[in-house]
Image (cartoon, grey):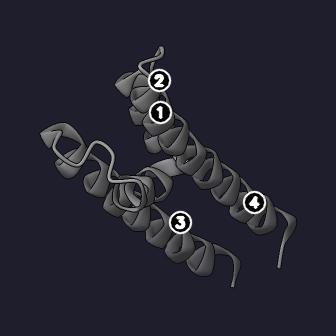
């Protein structure tokens, strides 16, 4: 594997791990009635690669599952990521193989 692919995979893993942690932390803060992590921050993290982490956190911690913006938006971002990754792989194969 090339260095770029390894860096991309590591970035994706880190973003999703961080996103899952944020969902766990926000659920904990909600129960403790403390200052919450903003929905905007969760969406920004999702947009930049953490959608599967947020989506997993929604189901694992039963958090934000009644928010229509999360129920629709986070899976949409995930499928956008899948399409983008597929497109990048196709371009890579076309130009470099």
Give the numbered dot on residue 10. Answer: 4
Image location (x, y in percent) of residue 12: 63, 57
Disc 3/disc 1 C-alpha distance (Å): 33 Å
Disc 3/disc 4 C-alpha distance (Å): 16 Å
Residue at the limit of the structure toward the right, as seen here: 3
Residue contact between numbered discs 1 and 2, judged by CB atoms under 8 Å: yes
Query: Which structural element holds mark 4?
Result: helix
Give the numbered dot on residue 88. Answer: 3
Q: Counting other residues with Cα less than 10 Å from the Cα at mark 2, is it few (<14), some (14-19), or many (20 or more)?
A: some
Give the numbered dot on residue 86. Answer: none
Please tell me which of labels 3 and 4 falls first in the chain: 4
Query: Which structural element holds mark 2?
Result: loop
Is residue 48 among the parts visible in the rendering?
Answer: no
Q: Which residue is mark 1?
A: 26
Q: Which residue is mark 2?
A: 37
Q: Nearer the viewer, residue 54 or 35?
A: 35
The picture quadrant where one finds residue 40 is top left
Disc 1/disc 2 C-alpha distance (Å): 6 Å
Disc 2/disc 4 C-alpha distance (Å): 24 Å
Q: Determine the residue positioned at 70% across, 52% down.
A: 14
Please tell me which of labels 4 and 1 falls first in the chain: 4
**On-image quarter of the N terminus:** bottom right
Q: Counting other residues with Cα less than 10 Å from the Cα at mark 3, is it few (<14), some (14-19), or many (20 or more)?
A: few
Is residue 14 among the parts visible in the rendering?
Answer: yes
Query: Which structural element holds mark 3?
Result: helix
Q: Determine the residue positioned at 32% across, 53% down.
A: 62
Image location (x, y in percent) of residue 97: 69, 85
């Amino acid at each position: 594997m090339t260095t770029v692919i390894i860096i991309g995979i590591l970035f994706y893993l880190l973003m999703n791990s961080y996103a899952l942690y944020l969902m766990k932390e926000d659920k904990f803060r909600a129960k403790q009635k403390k200052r919450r992590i903003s929905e905007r921050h969760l969406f920004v993290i999702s947009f930049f690669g953490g959608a599967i982490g947020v989506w997993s956190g929604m189901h694992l911690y039963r958090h934000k599952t009644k928010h229509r913006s999360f129920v629709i938006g986070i899976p949409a971002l995930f499928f956008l990521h899948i399409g983008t990754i597929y497109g990048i792989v196709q371009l890579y194969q076309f130009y470099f193989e």
